[in-house]
Image (tube, grey):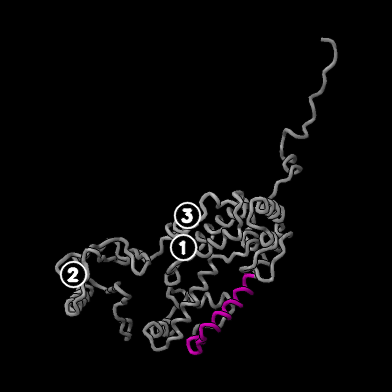
Amino acid sequence: MVAAILVPAPTCADDIAVLANSTADAQGILDIVQHHTSRDLVKINPTKSEAVLYNAKGSNISTLQFEDNDINITNETKHLGIKRNEQNRANISERIRTGRATIYSLLGAGLHVRRGFSPMVAYKLWRTYAVPRSIYGLEVMNLLAKEKDMLELAERKILRQIQGLPNNTANMAVYTLVGAEPIAITLDKNVLTFFMNIVRNSGTIECEILRRQIAFSDQRGKDFINRVEKTLSKYNLKSSSYYIENPLNKIEWKRLVGIKIKEYWKNECHNEKMEKTSLKYIEIQNNPLNEAHNIWKSVKNNSKDVKAGEIKARISTQTYIFQAKRAKFDPKVGTPPPPIMSGVP
């Protein structure tokens, strides 16, 4: 129970999760599950069942049993494709490795632009296959700021590789040249979509819990509603209390969120362009999200065009090293010859 709200064990297909505050409560729920499954002739394999203790470091727990078999107590388990650990935190390093392995399996040696692979096609593959695997289920977890930074850093590294840009390229140029949507914005969209899916179904348990969080939430808390409020404020949307009383349908909400996010990202692009001189040759598109710069938009998927596009991208971001600039910092160039000594010894 959550206050006066009855919350049954969440079940999906053949996966069931049991949540309890104590060992006795957990064992009691397992006994109820065993009774009903045996009555309905449903078989649950105890050897494949696992238990995880949340925030219980150093505490002891008696054995949990199901059908006279002990349930394995582990540090981490997977439910509905989301790994849950003792700290109830997402393993961001593993998520990053999953995304990188996905894009490498699709592109392999063609990940770098010098292999002649179009950055537009490479980004489409990254966006379609790698990003969903990297952020699956993160909208329901409380991510730290440093964990979001890790995801953004890993994504920018991939985007630099597929465009042939060096590490000192401005972050905004990395995104706007190929028309990429930052992974942080994708996470925000998932949070807002999940929020509206809940409030749209007003009679559900999830909506009742959300209403309770709105009534009793603390601004410094880690509840889901606090993350929703911060995201709504970030994109100049109305408060969660307004939308829970006036929910929008799927199409209206998607259109509204899309407009607000485009406005936010366009302002961010223009603000960074004004701050960094290396971006003065980059023309921000009317829609920086999902609209590539003409440098890459005009490039065909062949080695010659892609290599020419790489040079153009480097020149426009002022990361292309010209011979005159290289000579300026080369001690061997421009050094006067040694003086000629004359005279009789």
Residue, disc 2: 66
Which residue is at 53% across, 64% downward?
127
Q: Give the range drawn in magenta.
A: 242-265
The residue type indicated by label 3 comes to: Ser
Relative to 237, residue 317 above or below: above
Residues under labels 1 and 2: Cα distance? Answer: 34 Å
Disc on res. 105: 3
Quarter of the view holding residue 49 = bottom left
Relative to 295, residue 215 above or below: below
Q: Which of 47 and 129 is in front in this view?
A: 129
Q: As drawn, is 342 to the left or to the right of 259?
A: right
Q: Is mark 3 on a helix, strand or loop?
A: helix
Residue, disc 1: 134
**Dot 3: within a 10 Å radius of its alpha carbon, few (fewer than 14), some, or many (20 or more) residues?**
few
Q: Where is residue 28 in the image (x, y as percent from the top left)?
A: 19, 76
User: Does residue 168 appear in this view?
Assistant: no
Q: Main secondary structure of the magenta part?
A: helix
The residue type indicated by label 1 comes to: Ser
Relative to 271, residue 198 above or below: below
Residues under labels 2 and 3: Cα distance? Answer: 41 Å
Q: Are marks 2 and 3 in contact (CB under 8 Å)?
A: no
Which residue is at 17% across, 79% downward?
39
